[in-house]
Image: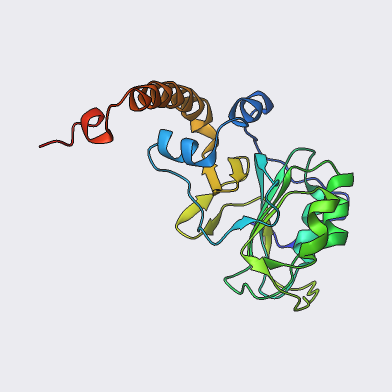
Amino acid sequence: MMSGLKTLSPTETIDFERVEAKLCEAARPFGTATLHEAGGKIGALPPQIKPMAPSFRVCGPAFTVQGPPGDNLRLHRALAAARPGDVIVASVGGVYEYGYWGEIMSTAGVARKLGGLVIDGCVRDGALLEGVGFPVFARGLCIKGTGKDFEARAFLGHPLLIGDITVNPGDLVCGDADGVCVVPRARAADVIQKSLDREAKEAKTMEQLRGGATTMDLYGWNR
């Protein structure tokens, strides 16, 4: 049975199987488009979710948060409960226009050695986030303040839906300037291998293009 936040003590851990650390490191060099395509066009979160600074990248296991609209108490709880390297992945019930996250929470994320935040909503303190150095991916910026409802129904460490993608706790989450891709934990090793194969094939294709071939030739579209 899923538990709301009010049933959890401040020191209680939320445990689930995570994608292996060695797979996170193996996936880190690949762009999100490569992982998405190599996996069979999987895991692309809504394109409105973008890094709040050009340098931001994330790659790690998902720590999922389903919070109520206009409230960020569960994100504070996630900051305390997540493990080093975890990427907090949050849904806020489709109500995007609040500043669910900002400089203080990013500072806490750095101190906790977390991997970053991916939120299907807005954040604040846009000019300061890059300086803090905690990668934040969001729909945009909004200064509107949030509430703290201790009785609201919310869940940590359970599956959630962002766009048409189900994100399970422990899935591999990768984000870069192009967007965010979620790879199911059970498929991570296979998708990484296919990404290696894809990059090798694309390197050969680009060499042929530099030699004068056309994409129409190489992909067999001249018919």
Furthest residue toward front: 212
Q: Position of residue 31 (x, y in %)?
A: 54, 37
Q: Where 213 sits versus 92, above or below?
A: above
Q: How many marks?
A: 0
- Identified at 22% across, 35% down, the residue is 216
Whole-percent x, y for residue 155 in the image? 67, 59
Q: Quadrant of residue 58?
A: top right
Q: Position of residue 214 (x, y in %)?
A: 27, 32
**Residue nearest the viewer, comparing 121 with 179:** 179
Q: How is the image coloured?
A: rainbow
Q: Is residue 206 visible?
A: yes
Can you see residue 6?
no
Compare residues 175 and 91 and report the one nearer the observer: 175
Of residues 111 and 69, the one nearer the viewer is 111
Q: Quadrant of the N terminus?
A: bottom right
Q: Residue at x 50, y 58 (%)?
A: 46
Q: Is residue 80 left or right of residue 19?
A: right
Which residue is the extreme one toward the left?
223
Please identify the quadrant where the C terminus is shown. top left
Q: Is residue 11 left or right of residue 212?
A: right
Q: Residue at x 38, y 38 (%)?
A: 40
The correct choice, above or below, for 200 with respect to 39 in the image is above
Query: Which of 8/141 is in front?
Result: 141
Q: Is residue 90 above or below residue 29?
A: below
